Amino acid sequence: MPGSIELRKKRVLIVGLARTGVATALFCAGHNAIVTATETRPENELADAPARLREAGVTLELGGHKERTYLTQDLIVPSPGVPADDPFLLTARSKGITVWSEIELAYRFLEGKLIGVTGSNGKTTTATLVHHILRTAASHTRPMSTCTGRMRWSGIGFGFGAQFMLARRFALTGPLHRIPTALAARASARGRP
């Protein structure tokens, strides 16, 4: 593990309240973090999410973000749709506040090795091939996403262009492995195998 994290009493900010943000906020609240969720949309555009989050003890900041909210956190988890160069995220990072994706947070709670296959083309084929190779090598692996790029684990739902699998008994050197498929696609586009 890269170092598991104890969320109890940690101040965690979730940025963005689409499906992943809501699931991540509920996950953190379930691990006794002090959770604040911020969203640019007003409450009337968020369906039942605000009620569910409030019931779980999450503090909501709706209709816009406030820099001071970012700067009073121990951990910030932006949703996949939030740009990495968001000015508030950049300011928080410059002040030494940890900013993790939901995958970075989730894999700290996994037992085993997480393999991510990313890219624009070939994810399903590559993930299927890697899964078959590991299964043949007598490793207990479990595919964790579908062709749509959706993953559910530990109560967190992830939706973006990646395939994931969990390998429990295989000699991988670290907890998170990434296999980019775009490199192979570029090489084949130039006529190379």
Image (cartoon, rainbow, N blue to C red):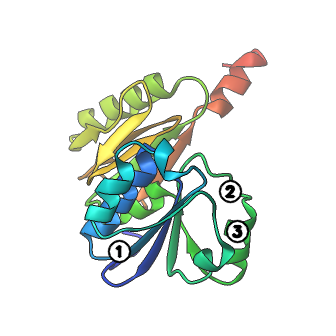
- The one of 58 and 128 positioned closer to us in this rendering: 58
User: Which residue was labeled with disc 2?
Assistant: 84
Q: Of the residues under marks 1 and 3, which one precedes in the sequence?
A: 1
What quarter of the picture does the C terminus occupy? top right
Residue 149 location, x and y as percent? Answer: 44, 32
**Which residue is located at x 41 percent, y 24 percent?**
147
- The one of 172 and 6 positioned closer to us in this rendering: 6
Residue 56 to residue 128: above or below: below
Where disc 2 sits, the SS reads loop
Q: From this viewpoint, which residue is outermost toward the right?
A: 190
User: Which residue was labeled with disc 1?
Assistant: 4
**Which residue is located at x 58 percent, y 23 percent?**
121
Res. 136 image quadrant:
top left
- Residue type beneath disc 1: Ser
User: Which residue was labeled with disc 3?
Assistant: 88
**Which residue is located at x 34 percent, y 46 percent?**
48
Q: Marks 1 and 2, how far apart in space?
A: 23 Å
Q: Marks 1 and 3, how far apart in space?
A: 26 Å
What quarter of the picture does the N terminus occupy? bottom left
User: Which circle, 1 or 3, is nearer the viewer?
Assistant: 3
- Residue type beneath disc 2: Ala
Residue 146: numbered disc: none
- Residue type beneath disc 3: Phe
Label 1: few (<14), some (14–19) or many (≥20) C-alpha neighbours in 10 Å: few
